[in-house]
Amino acid sequence: MDEWSDPLYVLSQVEHMLAATRAEFLPRFSAAAAAVLPHRAAAMETGDCSRIPIKVDGDPAITGSVTSAELQRLAALGVPGQAVVTEATLGGKRRKLVVLSSAPVIGNGAMIALVPTEDAPAELALGIVAKLWDIVSVNAAQRATDPEPEIIASNLAAATARAQTITDLGQTHATTLASLLAVLRSRQLGDAAARQTATDLAAAALVELRSVADRDRELSAEPASAAFDTLAAQLDPLVRHNDVTVDLSGPGDERPLAQDIAHTARTVTRGLVLAALERGSTRVRASWLIDGGALRITVRDDGPDVARAVPSTGLTERITPLDGRWEVDAVPGWGATITAILPLGVAETPELRPLDRLNSRELEVLAGIAMGKRNRQIAEELQLTEHTVKFHVRKILGKLEVTSRGEAAVLARELRLEVVGHVS
């Protein structure tokens, strides 16, 4: 710990952590903190990463059993800027823990729990790790709210991970239901004891489910108005000392935005505002509007250099993974209006053409109907029973939303039904 009295050593450690990739962040912090506060394991939960909100490092006997519910309960014990020493459950067991929390201006903050090797960590050590966490977590929050394009694109993998989590939850609650049934069927418990035990099991399961569901919503989406408020906080130090009027108009909408949409929208807005300032604009207006199934991010300025009013390649790379597009309207002497349009969700599947609703056998039967053939003839040519053909006819009428063979035949001819099959 003596080296921590050397300012150059302290600065080198901070620099080393600030340069860490997302994957390296926790191990580097844990290694640096261990020199001051020896510990067996570290577990972190961040409110800014929907992809992997829980990260662990250290003894696998502890980290292998850490759950989101445990970290949420620990987060409630934390005090931003302080190291809180407590006893709580982590990794399935009750332990002595040091809880560090942060509440940066940008982002949703993060919490880290350390499992110290000493029962009574020194006050100086606690103060150093608390301050160290404050510094590096601000940088981590900024990077999390401004993800690189490849991070955005890789979130398809996160969707798969979330699906796996849902599966795990289903298995957990299946176990709970099985436990409830076992209690209710037990001959060793009286009615009153069985009811009480079943009630306790159900209540605990519901609390756990609601906690995970609420946390999942927090990590995967945020209200549009809150997302814009975060943008305003990010822009304030950038424009505060410029002799430029920057007007911000929020969406006035509480509908949730997916985290990737919110992060990208803030990055794009900041980039467009700064580009407008670089072009000599004296007045800039940035606004968000949820229009149908898309978020429209519009930045207007009065800059004279409209020839450079083109979104940068970097910003285009940000919106491309989200199927975003640009609208640019630049008029010499009047300024420029640049709008980024980000779809809010997966596009709806186009309505199928009526004939696309039919399988290959139904198309063959329909071809026979269109040629005026009766069920018996169609059955003979397709080597089916007449009963089977009648079944297919009923299915065809339902799928085509018609009431008679005649209507089906007319529709088939209008849509130029072509079938390669046995009907001729």
Image: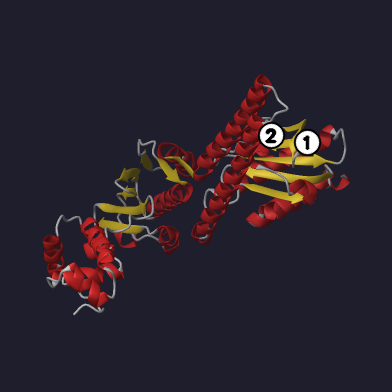
Query: Which element is circle 1 on?
Result: strand
Q: Is residue 332 left or right of residue 222?
A: left
Q: Which mark is residue 97?
A: 1
Closer to us: 389 or 94? 389
Q: Give the residue drawn at x 79%, y 48%.
A: 61
For residue 380, say whether it is visible.
yes
Please give the name of the residue rendered at 53% of the width and 36% of the height, measured from the top-left corner: 214
Image location (x, y in percent) of residue 97: 78, 36
398 or 39, nearer to the observer = 398
In the image, 124 versus 111, the foreground residue is: 111
Residue 74's disc is 2
**Alpha-carbon span between mark 2 and mark 1:** 9 Å
Residue at image coords 23%, 69%: 365
Q: Quadrant of the C terminus?
A: bottom left
Considering the image in quadrants, where does the N terminus appear? top right
Q: Are marks 2 and 1 in contact (CB under 8 Å)?
A: yes
- Could you tell me the amino acid type at mark 1? Leu
